[in-house]
Structure formats: C-alpha cells, structure tokens
Image: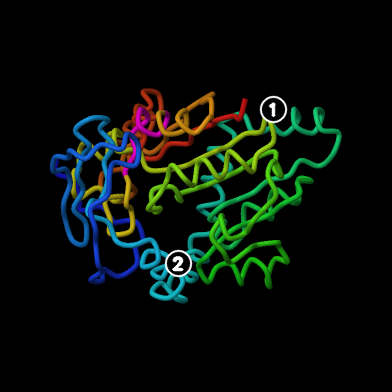
Amino acid sequence: MSLRQPVKTWSTPVTEEERRPVPCALCGGGRFKPSLSGEGFAYVKCAVCGLVQINPQPRAADVERRYRESSGNDYLAYELKNEAAFLELQKLSLADAGFDRIERELMERTGRKPSVLDVGCATGALLAFLQDRGWQTTGVEISPSAEYARTERGLDVRSQSLEDCRFPPESFDLALASHVVEHLNNPATFIRQTWQLLRRGAYFMLTTPNIDGFQARLLGKRWRSAIFDHLYLFSIRTIKAMLKAQGFVTEGIYTWGGLAAGIAPLPLKTFADKTAKALRLGDVMLVKARKP
C-alpha cells in the first residue's frame, strides 16, 4: 500500500540568504555528514552527537526578518484557520504531561496565581485558556499574530525576541515553547535564557518535531517537518542532552502522531497513531523539564 504525499508544515517562502558554517549547537563539533535535503533545506548530522541541523545557516537577523516581514498576514490567516485544532492538541499534550497536577502543585506551593510565559504564543489561544484557569499570563511572539493576541484578546504579548524583552530573572513558574526551538539559530542560548527566567522548582514544557519518530523515518526528506524554516531537527536524545547542558532535569517525554491525516486510510492511521504513542515514536514530542 502506497502512502499519499504528506502536506508539509507551514513555512515562509524559500529565499536566497547569506549562509555561514556554524559549529554544532549541542556539542560544538565541526564534523558533519549529509542527512535530509530538499527544496530550501539541506540538513547535516553531527558526526559526534547526532544533532541534525541546517549548516551552513542563515544569519539570525535574516531568520527573524522572515517571520516579521515575509510571512505577513498569510501566517496570521494560517494560525486563525487552525487555531481551534492547535489548541486542542496543546491541551491534550499538556494533559499527557500531568498539567492539572502541576497546576495544583504550583498554586499550593506559591499561595498565589502561578505565572506562565508562552514563547511563540501565536494568536494567544493557549494563554487565554490559561488565563481563564487563573494563571498570570505573558507571551512572546515576533510574527503579526502578536497584534491579534493583544487587540482581540487583551493579552500581554511582547513583539520582541526573548532576550530583548529583558524580563527579570526568576519571574515565572512555568515556561511554554511550542514549535519554537527548531526555528532558532541558537537553541542552547534560548534554553539557557529560559532557565534564567524560571524560579527554582519551575517547569519548562517544550514541544518540537521528533526526527526519530515513525513518520520521519518512513518519509525521509518528504517528512512534513523537513522544511526551510526548521534549522534543527531534534531526537529525544539530543533535546534531552541540550536541556541537561543548560541546567534542566527532564521529568517526562510524551509523543504523538503516527501518520499525518490524509496520507493513509483511517484504520491504518489509527493503528499507527496508537503504536507510535505507546513506543514514544510519535511525530511530535513534548518534553517536561524542571529547574532544580
């Protein structure tokens, strides 16, 4: 039985950008071997630690410009069209990670409304959901979706990079970053900055595609997360190593998605989804980490 061509994750248009070689973002090594390649992307795999990355890479300023300018209102339209489905997926993944227990723990320990920082919060749907549950909410989003979150939802969402926001150290009880880390030139720096913004005992929930998942292994360069905008593709092992190197303790990893909708008959998709989840071979993973 042949599988239909999967629909790729939304990406900014492929453009010509100046690129420069960079060391591995995880181990600092400089030896790589070819990995996936396709339209707008050519991934290599670190010969030392196995991190998959686009290398040479575009400059960080050019990457940020993609999201501020090139995506324009197309990205906002995409987010609004899929907002309900994305929110439901986020709620299900948080439930898998024991979010209700974490929420009770933080409220009991702090004696106040816990604070959450959502980096890459898009239209703010998840922040609005958490605010309704009693959280103090702050978001960071550099795309045009930030204005929607502010004007339509009245949320505190900053249109700056995390570094430029200059939040005081140890400001938050929980940080969320859904489909952010794979877009960044310096993912380790981002994780370290997040560590600094969290209080002792706070949680970090990071969601990213899983290159060791069933779909990635099956589809190779046709995998929906192999796109121009994803500078890094993490496995469970490499994301855990990067979190550990920046001071976090991983407390759980949860994956989902065996086959993308529309590429196989429903019975096969249902079986693949259940199996991938049970074996931690899902297409996307949520990592629950904690600042000791």
Question: What SS does tag 1 mark?
Answer: helix
Closest to the observer: 273 or 58?
A: 58
Query: Residue 104: x, y in percent?
Result: 76, 30
* Residue 132 left/right relative to 281: right
Residue sitting at x 37%, y 53%: 185
- The answer to which of marks 2 and 1 sits earlier in the sequence is 2
Q: Amino acid at mark 2?
A: Tyr
Numbered label attached to residue 192:
none
The vertical placement of 75 against 202, above or below, is below
Closest to the observer: 29 or 57?
A: 29
In the rendered image, which residue does mark 1 sit on?
A: 101
Query: Residue 42: x, y in percent?
Result: 18, 53
Residue sitting at x 38%, y 69%: 66
Query: Residue 143: x, y in percent?
Result: 50, 67
Q: In the figure, residue 216 lies in which quadrant?
A: top left
Position of the C terminus by quadrant: top right
Which range of residues does the magenta coloring cover?
A: 233-240
Q: In the figure, residue 228 lies in which quadrant?
A: bottom left
Closest to the observer: 155 or 63?
A: 63
For label 1, the crowd category at 10 Å Cα-Cα, with few meaning under 14, some 14 to 19 and many 20 or more, is few
Closest to the observer: 147 or 188?
A: 188
In the rendered image, which residue does mark 2 sit on?
A: 78
